[in-house]
Each structure stands twice: as C-alpha cells, then as structure tokens.
Image (cartoon, rainbow, N blue to C red):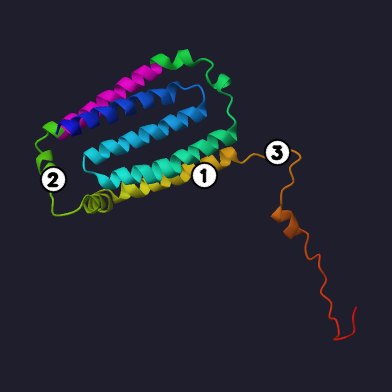
Amino acid sequence: MIIAGLAFYLFAIIAVAAAVMVITARNPVHSVLWLILVFFNAAGLFLLLQAEFLAMTLVVVYVGAVAVLFLFVVMMLDLNTQVLREGLAEYVPLGAVIGLILLVEIATVGGSWLLSPEMEQVRGAVARTDITNTQALGNLIYTDYVYLFQAAGLVLLVAMIGSIMLTHRVRPGVKKQKVAEQLARGRTVEVKKVPTRGGI
C-alpha cells in the first residue's frame, strides 16, 4: 500500500512537471519530448488504477503514433517560435481564466462522481470483477456512448485532413507530377501492328 502511494506521487509529480515543461519549453521539439514523458507517467497512473488496457493504449497509440506524428509535423513546418511568442503576456490573464473554469468543471465532475447517489450503481458496475477491464470498457463505449465514439472518430478525421493541408505547400521550382494535365493531353503513344519477322 505504501509502495503504491509512493508510486502514485512519483508518477503524478513527474507528469505535472513535464506538463509544465511542455508549455514553457522554447523549442517545439523539446515540448513534444516532454509530452511523451507526460504520456508515460499517465500510463503509470492508469496501471496503478488497474486499467491495463488504457495504459497500453496510451503508450502504443499516443506515444507510438500521435507524439511521433507531432514530432515530424513540428520538424516539417519549421516554425518561427520568436514570432509565435510575440504578445504572449497579453494572453496570460485570459489563459488563467480559462484554466480556472476548466478546473472548476473537473472538480464538479469529480464531486458528482463521489457524492451523487445515482452513481452508486455505476460504481458498483465498475467494481465488478467477473469481467475484464477491456470488456467493461468495450461494453460502455459501444453501447452507451457509441454515437460519441463515432463523433470522436469524425473529429480525428477532420484533424488529420487539416494537418495534411497545413503541411502540403506548393514550392516554386519543384517539379511535381500533374495527373490531370497528363490525362488531358490525350493519347500520345501510337500502337502499330508489326508483322512477324518483318520489323518496322
């Protein structure tokens, strides 16, 4: 029990410190690397909650795919961080207000989970031990929240298309294949019947 508590505080402190470094690092590549550290520590917290499936999903999907994609996009865009940081102090009060609102919302959701009498049966359903963690999560997602799950997939699709459009730039002097112009030219190869042993 003491080891679990120490592990929780270790993962939580490192995750919070790495999250602060994500938004304060001057180099965007360093921010992505700090984000990967946040994901690993969050996976450790999921393991302490006995949510092994979520922990492995966080490592495989977010660290193995999303964070690496962020890293490549940041390196491809060649962002000018000096221009992006101009006027940053003007938005600090607005960011603090939005952060406070999000904190109140999270506290409200957590308080309703702990104090609401309707949540007793939900907590009892979650505490069942006759089904695995993955099966319980699948039953919840694909029955009660299937439409929200599909909506999240559409949001990710739109984000993927947007990232492709951001990185797709036309550079002068770079030769590219233009399929539409090639097809519009018509037939450029003439097929001739060559007799056997006759040559052309």
Q: Position of residue 198 (x, y in %)?
A: 90, 84
Residue under label 1, please give it: 161
Q: Amino acid at mark 1?
A: Ile
Distance (Cα) linking label 3 and label 2: 57 Å
Q: In this picture, which residue range is highlighted in magenta? A: 94-113
Residue count near mark 1 (Cα–Cα under 10 Å), binned few <14, some 14–19, many ≥20: few
Tell me the residue at 54%/22% (across/down).
Answer: 84
Q: Quadrant of residue 119?
A: top left
Label placed on residue 171 = 3
Helix, strand or loop for the magenta stretch, by majority = helix
135 and 107: which is toward the camera: 135
* Quadrant assignment, res 12: top left
Q: How many marks?
A: 3
Q: Position of residue 159 (x, y in %)?
A: 47, 41
Sequence-wise, the earlier of marks 3 and 2 is 2
The residue positioned 57% from the left and 41% from the top of the image is: 165
